Amino acid sequence: MQVDELKVPGAWSFTPRQFPDPRGVFLEWYKAAVVEDVVGHRLGLAQANHSVSSRGTLRGVHFADVPPGQAKYVYCTRGAVLDVIVDLRVGSPTFGVSDAVRLDEVDRRGVYLSEGLGHAFLALTDDANVTYLCSEPYHPTGEHGVHPLDRELDLPLPRDVEPLLSEKDAAAPSLSEAREQGLLPSYDACLAFYETLRGGSGQ
């Protein structure tokens, strides 16, 4: 499995080896030992989500309070999406920086993002199926969003796909507004939380 660190610290892409034969193809799309070696701790599986999206659907930017936050391992089982990770940790040297990875049924790569990072994806095809493993269950009061089309974020989205947002995501605050409202996670708090995970007390 090939591992590549993204421009946002705390996020990586994982490209598995594929073994095709006349019957089809076999691959290991998630390997806990590889993720643990790269991240420095296990990904505790508390919830697994699956979404089906039409072309142009833009979900996010979503993030959760830290602690406990919500780390994710994202994988596209059908179609193609552009997966986007944003550093929303106030005080981070890369605050506001984003990176994007195409997830599809060709390369079949996955993306891991740590707690405190923002996540969004844009469906590039109809019937785009995305599965994501989550370290924590959904906590309605601890979940937040930043508007994905905020000019300050300037996410690397293709211009030939018209984005379709949910009412909730369309009403999300801008990055500056979320920061002023105290919604964004603290970089120092995230680093401290990562340390507890590496010490084995959190997972």
Image (cartoon, rainbow, N blue to C red):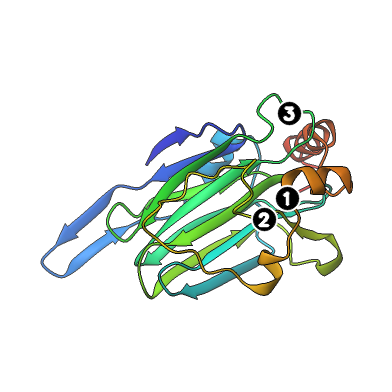
Left-right relation of 172 to 19: right
Q: Residue at x 62, y 36 (%)?
A: 10
- Name the foreground residue: 194 vs 151: 151
Query: In the rendered structure, are the residues bearing label 1 and label 3 in contact, judged by CB atoms less than 8 Å apart?
Result: no
Can you give x and y, in whole percent of width and height, for residue 56 in the image?
Answer: 44, 67
Residue that mark 2 sits on: 147
- Residue 197 in the figure: left or right of residue 28: right
Q: Which residue is mark 1?
A: 174
Q: List x then y, in percent, for residue 38.
A: 55, 34
For marks 2 and 3, the one nearer the N-term is: 3
Residue placed farthest to the top in the image? 93
Question: CA–CA distance between discs 1 and 3?
Answer: 18 Å
Q: Can you identify the residue that label 3 sits on?
A: 92
Q: Is residue 72 above or below residue 156?
A: below
Residue 135 position within the rendered picture, expressed as x and y whole percent measured from the top left: 69, 56
Q: Amino acid at mark 2?
A: His
First in sequence: mark 1 or mark 3? 3
- Residue found 48% across the figure and 52% down from its top: 83
In space, the residues marked 2 and 1 are separated at their CA atoms by 5 Å
Q: Which one is in front, 16 or 57?
A: 57
Q: Secondary structure at mark 2?
A: loop
- Give, as a three-letter code, the residue at label 1: Ser
Foreground label between 2 and 3: 2
